[in-house]
Image (spheres, rainbow, N blue to C red):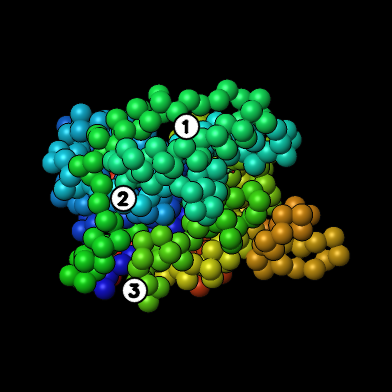
Amino acid sequence: MPAHVVVGAQWGDEGKGKVVDLYTEFADVVVRYQGGNNAGHTLVVERDGKPDKTVLHLIPSGILHPDKVCVIASGVVVDPAICLKEIDALQQRGYLKAKSERLLIADDASVIMPYHSALDLAREASRGDDKIGTTGRGIGPCYEDKVGRRSILIRDLLDEDSLRAKLDRLLPEKNHLLSFYGEPLFEMEPMVKELLGYGERLAPFVGDARQYIHAQLSRDRQLLFEGAQGTLLDVGLGTYPFVTSSHTTAAGVCINTGVAPSALDEVVGITKAYCTRVGSGPFPTELDDAVGEHLRDVGREFGSTTGRPRRCGWIDVAALRYAVRVNGLTGLAVTKLDVLSGLDSVKLAVSYTDAEGNEYDEPPMNCETLEQLTPVYEEMPGWDEDLSNMRQRQELPETAQRFLERLETILEVPIILVSIGPARAETIVIRHLNR
Ligand code: IMP
């Protein structure tokens, strides 16, 4: 049963969108399995001979390929207004033609309600310097309701009685919380009207995603599961509490889509050739110097969802070691190697030490301990060449090849793809996914 997974191996923003877009060529169905519109996948494809940029927050990047089916699984939290905005934009630009056939939204996905975003922002504001640095999109409060067994589900937007019954219970409680934070309250009638309007427009795309995925697998169709955010932002396995509220790792595929662990085939981890983080939390290799500026400027490291400047630093191989282990990575895709061009030397953090000289091979998932650690770096000579026209690994400057080899040696995972620019063509494909 060919089911491949693409996950972020760092703190998100690794370039998963581009890699999924490339791998979609070999897939029949692309499934987004967690997160919501906190993600932002930037895709640049050739259209009418010109590069054309699309930013997607919710709909799987595979939608840019004609004839592929994209699924938003039940583990995703869906802001219906954002979802419709993306559908409209894709339809206007000719990427999404036949209405219901190419996009399926799980009827049991949780809906991000207007009060979720309001609560997210209010809670963050109340935390002052201790804030998580969330995207403010209501992700955490929506997942809280899911685990609390009180979500409004997508199918409730198609059923007025069910929506009203749930909101009758929920809204007074949410308004109570909002008044605690001194925020404006929500009224029932305008909210119901708005949500039913969304439901009516989403209806042609809504169905039983779990059953659909199962049927595709039993027919031996090729499935690609697209992760959002990154391993270190997993609510269970990441740098808690500075994490998102979903399971971003490969295991998240199973609980969020109903696919058994034994059905998963390849798990590809995406890592930049350096490292970034948005929001608060430990980041051992963060740079506050000219190299950090270089990475931010050349790599255009500003959030595609919030526009926030990303924190930048050297690649953290010790953290990648952890990502390899918890995801069971079978291959690595290294993105943005081109951004390192022009640096005299490049560094890789291979472990950390504490004040007593103890060495750590992997990041301890205790933020207070992790904050105290110092990275142990290996330094390698850099390169100046523009890599964007290189299409074979052997064409890369020798120093860049050595950098990649060092990564493979330490992590004991083959690099199967190297990205050297945002466009589809700016890619060195070393090996395709197994079919
Ligand atoms: P939330 O997902 O909006 O609750 O944010 C929680 C943490 O995850 C914050 O540090 C965010 O910056 C981070 N985060 C959420 N989504 C992304 C993403 O797509 N890329 C990178 N960081 C993210």
Between 227 and 21, which is closer to the camera in this rendering?
227
Question: Residue 128: which quarter of the image?
Answer: top right
Label 1 residue SS: helix
Instruction: Find out if the beta carbon at label 1 lies less than 8 Å from the nearest ligand 1 atom.
Output: no
Between 109 and 60, which is closer to the camera in this rendering?
109
Whole-angstrom CA distance, mark 2 to mark 1, is: 19 Å
Residue 109 image point, x, y percent: 38, 50
* Residue lying furthest right: 356
Q: Amino acid at mark 3?
A: Ala
Q: Residues within 10 Å of mark 3 (few under 14, many from 20)?
A: few
Residue 287 image point, x, y percent: 67, 43
Residue under the point 40% across and 26% down? 189
Label 3 residue SS: helix
Determine which residue is flagged by label 3. Answer: 263
Query: Which quadrant contains ligand 1?
Result: top right
Q: Residues within 10 Å of mark 2 (few under 14, many from 20)?
A: many
Indicate which disc, 2 or 1, sits on the residue closer to the N terminus. Answer: 2
Residue 37 image point, x, y percent: 43, 40
Between 207 and 127, which is closer to the camera in this rendering?
207
The N terminus: image quadrant: bottom left
Q: Which mark is residue 114?
A: 1
Q: Amino acid at mark 1?
A: Pro
> For this view, does 392 lie left or right of residue 298?
left
Q: Amino acid at mark 2?
A: Asp
Residue 177 seen by the camera = yes
Q: Which mark is residue 107?
A: 2
> For this view, does 147 lie left or right of residue 124?
left
Residue under the point 64% across and 42% down? 132
Residue under the point 51% across and 30% down? 307
Between 245 and 48, which is closer to the camera in this rendering?
245
Instruction: Find out if the beta carbon at label 3 lies less than 8 Å from the nearest ligand 1 atom.
Output: no
